[in-house]
Image: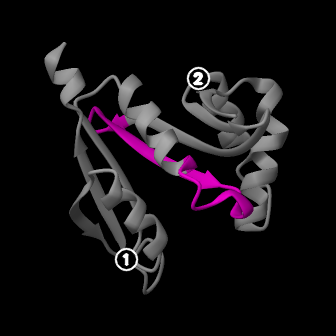
């Protein structure tokens, strides 16, 4: 059974393990721990096992910014990224939501487009030869409150 919820500190090791599978090291352990403590980390579960996570903040020009969406490689293409994004949109405290991915990350570009995000610009020089595409989505739910 799939579920989405805010991460707890007890989830830290499982989340870091997923991150390590993708990036090859556990260098973001402290970043992930802090996001969990500040209630900025959401996890996707399947049959009571964490299969992915999303980290966000609201420091991007006072707008929400999804800084990480990572799903365990064996669990991709099962809608977990979409479920994480949908959950976040429902709890986002701001009307504007941004995120980004490298131009080489075609898979994540498709996820953003499938979830109604539009391209909003590019940032050069973060990763040499692989510009970052900025994505935007308006959170109409916040506008109605």
Residue 113 sits in quarter: bottom left
Which disc, if any, is residue 55?
Answer: none
Q: Residues within 10 Å of mark 2 (few under 14, many from 20)?
A: few
Residue plotted at (39% across, 77% down):
103
Q: Which residue is mark 1?
A: 131
Residue 4 as seen in the image, left or right of residue 108: right
Residue 38 sits in quarter: top right
Q: Which residue is mark 2?
A: 38
Q: Residues within 10 Å of mark 1 (few under 14, many from 20)?
A: some
Magenta span contains residue 126: no
- Indicate the position of residue 3 as horizontal and vertical percent values: 63, 31
Answer with mark 2 or mark 1, whichever residue precedes in sequence.
2
Residue plotted at (82% across, 51% down):
17
136 in relation to 129, above or below: above
- Indicate the position of residue 121 as horizontal and vertical percent values: 21, 65
Residue 19 sits in quarter: bottom right
Q: Read off the magenta span.
A: 59-80
Q: Nearer the viewer, residue 106 or 97?
A: 106
Residue farthest front in this picture: 1
Residue plotted at (82% across, 26% down):
10
- Indicate the position of residue 48 as horizontal and vertical percent values: 79, 32
Q: Nearer the viewer, residue 76 or 129?
A: 76
Residue farthest left in this picture: 144
Q: Quadrant of the N terminus?
A: top right
- Indicate the position of residue 22 as horizontal and vertical percent values: 71, 64
Residue plotted at (38% across, 42% down):
65
């Amino acid at each position: 059974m799939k579920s989405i919820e805010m991460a707890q500190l007890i989830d830290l090791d499982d989340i870091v393990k997923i991150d390590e599978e993708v990036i090859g090291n556990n260098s973001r352990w402290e970043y992930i721990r802090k996001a969990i403590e500040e209630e900025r980390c959401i996890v996707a579960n399947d049959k009571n096992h964490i299969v992915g996570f999303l980290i966000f903040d609201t420091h991007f020009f006072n707008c929400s910014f999804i800084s990480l969406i990572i799903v365990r490689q064996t669990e991709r293409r099962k809608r977990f990224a979409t479920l994480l994004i949908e959950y976040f949109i429902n709890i986002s405290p701001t009307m504007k939501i941004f995120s980004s991915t490298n131009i080489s990350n075609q898979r994540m570009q498709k996820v953003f487009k499938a979830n109604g995000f539009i391209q909003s610009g590019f940032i050069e020089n973060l990763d040499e030869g692989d510009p970052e595409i900025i994505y935007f989505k308006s959170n109409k739910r916040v506008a109605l409150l």
